[in-house]
Amino acid sequence: MADSTHLLNSKQMARFVAEGYLRFDELVPDDLNRAVKAEMDNQAIPREEAGLPLSAIWPEAAVGRVFRLPEIEGIIHSLVGPDPLYDHHAVHTVAAGHHFGQHWHADAIIDTRLHFDIQFMYFAHDTPREMGGTLILPGSHYRRISESDIARYHNFVGQVPMICKAGTVIVLHHGMWHCAQPNRTDEMRYMFKLRLNPTVRQLRLWNTEDIDDPEVSHILSTNQPWHGNEERIEHVNRIHFWRFLTGDDQFDNHYWLSRIENEPELV
Amino acid sequence: MPETRQKLLVLYLRTPDLHAGVVAWSEFDGTSAADERHTSGDAADSGGATNPPYASVVDAMRDGWRVVQFPQQYPAYPGTEYQVSYLKYEYILEKLEVVDG
């Protein structure tokens, strides 16, 4: 059970709803980063069976200790609840001197649920721009595409390369678009990915004390520069998702849904 | 007759207006050597550039790019009115360049 002091707050959840990810810089301690790096160097992190409880995975390994850190458990609990399932993990590598970028993609296939999985991306060593890191596209998580359908796109206004120090973790909605980047250094670049599935209804799992903070509405209204004319449709998707997460089916933001749901029958 | 080869520039706009700002872009260069992309790591790859090469389609046309495909516009299929997916306003432009035989 996650320590309640490490749960996300409503403003962070609103950021997740608007942008599809949250970033935590230098969250994992250095000794653990070095231990996980060694496990990746030695290919010592076994692939587990999809659908096992996360609590049963990697009882001894350093990477298991990462996902049992109180701060990480708080993130997990807030997004997918107390007993998530292991879906899969991957030790992603970009070899030294690999000079071209991976094509843009989202993982898995078209997923029409409001229920959602999360994917952690954990950077166990410093990742300067010349090393990559993973390129992500904020606000891409509602887009219904299948894996590499988006491979024709090369660059977006607002794309974010993960330039970070060791121990940095980002957690993504499963729909986020991303791709690996060239590694122009002479060292292997790693990114550890872990996908988790919820086992409970994802309803107010975070610390909701600030649920009525006006900043929540402001964050939900944050536009991405690449959305263009679809900004308002994106807002509709965010409102639907916030209703799902809060259980408040009357929630609205800037009257977008109130207007189009107004169908009076009074005669 | 000199041999010409095609360069493609794909621009994605804020709206269907050809003056609208560019929100995403791709480049495909048929004049380059077959293995060049795999060694250059240039703007023809994901993440290869931060800023669009042109401000709009019209801006690219002024630099000699010819528009070869417009995005078709269809009303949303019933039930998909609030779904988002691909970038809607995709314009494909070309330049033909003479290459040494």
Image: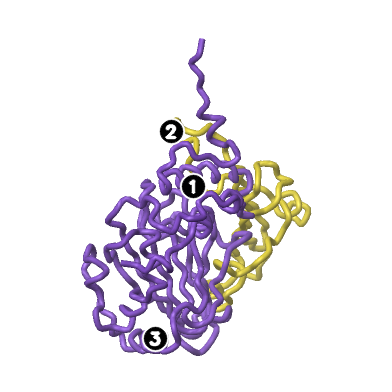
Q: CA distance from mark 3 to mark 2?
A: 48 Å
Question: Horizontally, is A217 left or right of A209 in the view?
Answer: right
Amino acid type at mark 2: Gly
Q: Which residue is mark 2?
A: B79
User: What shade has chain B been given?
Assistant: yellow
Percent from the top left, x then y, of residue A35?
A: 37, 88
Q: Badge 1 local density, few (<14 within 10 Å), some, or many (20+)?
A: few
Mark 2–mark 1 distance (CA, rounded to whole Å) = 14 Å
Q: Which residue is situated farthest in the right direction here?
A: B62
The subunit letter for the residue under badge 3 reads A
Residue at (46% x, 55% y) in the render = A208
At mark 1, the secondary structure is loop
Which residue was labeled with disc 1?
A: B85
Tag 1, which chain? B
Comparing A95 with A164, the one in front is: A164
Q: Amino acid at mark 1?
A: Ser
Out of A157 and B9, give the one closest to the viewer: A157
Identify whether A33 is placed above or below A182: below
Give whichever of A152, B93 is nearer the camera.
Answer: A152
At x 49%, y 80%, the residue is A98
Q: Quadrant of the N terminus of chain A?
A: bottom left
Residue farthest top in this picture: A267
Q: Are marks 1 and 3 in contact (CB under 8 Å)?
A: no
For residue B36, side relative to residue A114 (left or right): right
Residue shown at the point (73%, 55%) measured from the top left: B55
Using the rendered image of the protein, determine whether residue A261 is visible from the camera's viewpoint: yes
A117, above or below A98, in the image: above
Q: Mark 3 against mark 2, which lies toward the viewer?
A: 3
Identify the chain drawn in purple: A
Counting from the top left corner in percent of width and height, residue A73 is at 36, 69
Determine the residue positioned at 68% across, 61% down. B52
